[in-house]
Image (cartoon, helix red, strand yellow):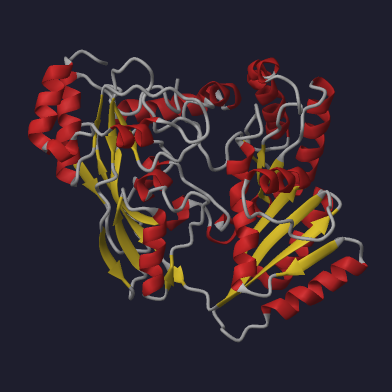
Amino acid sequence: MHRGNMAQLTGQLLETLGPKGIVRDEGQLESMTKPWRDKWTSEPALVVQPATTSEVQSVVRICRELGFPIVPQGGNTGVTGAALCREGGTEVLLSLRRMNRIRELDVDDDMLIAEAGCVLNDVKDAAAEVGRLFPLSLGAQGSCMIGGNIATNAGGINALRYGPMRNMVAGLEVVTADGDVWSSLKLLRKDNSGYDLKQLFIGSEGTLGVITAATLKLSMLPARSATAIVAVKSPVEAISWFRKVREAFGGQLTACELIERICIDVTARRIPGIVDPLPTKYPWYVLLEVDSLDPDAELEGRLGSLFEQAYDAGVVLDGAIASSSAQAQALWHLRESIGEAHRHEGVSFKHDISVPVSKVPAFIAEAQHRLSELYPGIRSFAFGHIGDGNIHFNPVQAEGEPAESWAGKLADINRVTHDITVKLGGSITAEHGVGQLRRSELVHYKSPLEIQMMQSIKNVLDPAGLFNPGKLLL
């Protein structure tokens, strides 16, 4: 698409946005162009940060006229390269960081309107101040932003109860490829007046338009919660334990996480302050949280009774219930630190798969067996949201071997892992999205009709290929 010249682009954008709208500071540029985990190379022609929706409109119109593609970006915390420019310096990186205002918070309707650059933690804090909960919970919530959460349909640990981001969005404001603004920022829970257009943009990874604001659904803030971790022999017993807790607590079960032993070993070794949750080491663990609106709810006692029954039945091997908020926070800090620790362990092969919950044990067993058979020494590294079937299956190279001998195995390991996933009725990505990382895999596993339908939507909403080329679709 690129056909303009840099001097003209820079001049027009500087005149429109002012000096604050063009990013030149080296520290800022690094934070916007360097991925936190993988080694994507990002070379934008220019980095801009508009402060208002009208300024985003101006950026879109100028870039469209001069032929510079646009890559929208929030907090740059993604793991698929979706919010990074490609090599060559022909794309404009549009950061939403300055659009960080909460426009409205309505307690009667339990809605909050936030701009795309609002940090997730700030939205959660604003809701908590009025006794409400914005339930999206991610390890990166101190830096990820609402626009990026929506564009990737983020999931997180609370998706078991509240669903992914798609379930939390009531309306959107989007700048289209023509530079127009489409808005559905109403405080409505129900609207059946035609196509639900916002769903096209949720999970679209910036390929259809620039999300500038959203109406978010709030929930009641729990008055009491309890966190427990149990040890189990295998994922089979983990599923049994999950079912027992779900049957006992129903919708009060907020999160349920599976953790393989190696994840704890690596995290304790790589992250200061992490301690083993139990005095003895076990093969697998399940970390969960239940909560209640009743401040007098006896959550710990009920969990303890369930544990005793499961222990007597041989389902669980050991366990602990957090006796304070500090202990609960330490357990969740362990879980949230796994991804950071993992990236220091050498060459790894990251998968964000989902299968039916009942198939999680079969997936892990078959994937572990097949990969160890094909790649001797490869270390299984599995953790994730067992309650909704989303497992981060991220095997690591053999310990002590040179990274060079493992670096070229990604495509083959992907194919083995994803073949097993799809055979079991699963998806090759559950919450991280496609980006640059899984484009070729998407084409391999989706039907030609699905790809054709997705491409048709792209052609209608972005016929010139202005938004985020090279991501999601080939």
Locate residue 87, reporting x and y percent: 38, 17
Q: Is residue 331 above or below residue 346?
A: below
Locate residue 276, reporting x and y percent: 74, 56
Is any part of residue 204 visible from this angle?
Answer: yes
Q: Tell how many labels.
A: 0
Apparent side of residue 252 relative to residue 220 in the rendered image (left or right): right
Residue sitting nearer the eye, 185 or 455: 185
* Residue at x 43% of width, y 29% of height: 454
Q: Can you tell which quarter of the image residue 34 is in?
A: top left
Locate residue 151, reporting x and y percent: 40, 42
* Residue at x 37% of width, y 64% of height: 189
* Residue at x 34% of width, y 21% of height: 43
Q: Can you tell which quarter of the image residue 425 is in?
A: top right
Q: Can you tell which quarter of the image residue 229 is in?
A: bottom right
Apparent side of residue 306 relative to residue 58 in the rendered image (left or right): right
Q: Is residue 152 above or below residue 30?
A: below
Image quarter of the N terminus:
top left
Residue sitting nearer the eye, 460 or 55: 55
